[in-house]
Amino acid sequence: MTMNNDDLDALLEPVGQTSGTYVKWEQPGDQITGTIVSFNVEGGTDFNDQPCPQLVLATNEGNIIINGSQANLRRNMTNGAPRLKPGHLCRVAFTGLYETPKGHGKEFAISVSPAPVLIDVDDTDF
């Protein structure tokens, strides 16, 4: 798949809030879409400073870091690790809440393109 700059802008526009370079999941429906820059099963840290998966996506807003610190997101990232490869298009979406013994957990869905996305970049844009 080859894209021009207009196609890239349309695909990589994040929907959802970002806090610095990290995603802030506030409402079900928030999502971020971008090209995978890197993925590391133990590259991030969770709320207890323990290792957790970390996914970095290139977007129009710059590189966005997604730490798999929430249980459902951690599980989805770990299970999807073989497909989370640099160059592939990826969308992470906050899809809803579920009950836990301590309150609510956030539920996520991760979608990944079957092949890397090739992008034609006109060097006059830089």
Image (cartoon, rainbow, N blue to C red):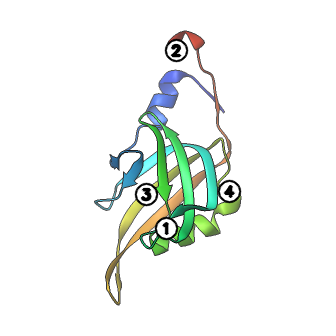
The residue lying at 47 percent from left, 68 percent from top is 46
Residue behind mark 4: 83
CA distance for labels 1 and 4: 15 Å
Drawn side of residue 14 relative to residue 44, left or right: left
- Element type at mark 2: loop
| Residues tagged 3 and 4 counted as in contact (Cβ below 8 A) | no
Disc nearer the start of the sequence (3/1): 1
Residue 116: which quarter of the image? top right
- Residues packed near mark 2 inside 10 Å, few (<14), some (14 to 19) or many (20 plus): few
Residue 102 lies in quadrant: bottom left
Instruction: Using residue 13 as the reference point, say whether residue 87 is left or right of it.
Output: right
Task: State the CA–CA distance, disc 3 to disc 1.
Answer: 10 Å
Q: Nearer the viewer, residue 78 or 46?
A: 46
Mark 1 and mark 2 in contact? Answer it, CB < 8 Å. Answer: no
Instruction: Report the Cα–Cα distance between label 3 and label 2.
Output: 31 Å
User: Which numbered tag is attached to residue 73?
Assistant: 1
Label drawn at residue 126: 2
Q: Are marks 4 and 2 in contact (CB under 8 Å)?
A: no
Q: Tell me which amino acid carries mark 3.
A: Ala
* Image height of 44 relative to 36, above or below: below
Amino acid type at mark 4: Arg
At horizontal 47% and vertical 69% (from top left) the residue drawn is 49
- Residue drawn at (36%, 45%) of the image: 20
Q: Amino acid at mark 1?
A: Leu
- From the viewer's perspective, is residue 96 above or below residue 43? below
Point out residue 103 in the picture as x, y percentages from the top left corner: 29, 83
Viewer-nearest of labels 3 and 1?
Answer: 1
Real-space CA distance between mark 4 and mark 2, rounded to the nearest whole angstrom:
31 Å
- Looking at the image, is mark 1 or mark 4 nearer the viewer? 1
Question: Residue 67's x, y, as percent?
Answer: 49, 60
The residue tagged 3 is 93
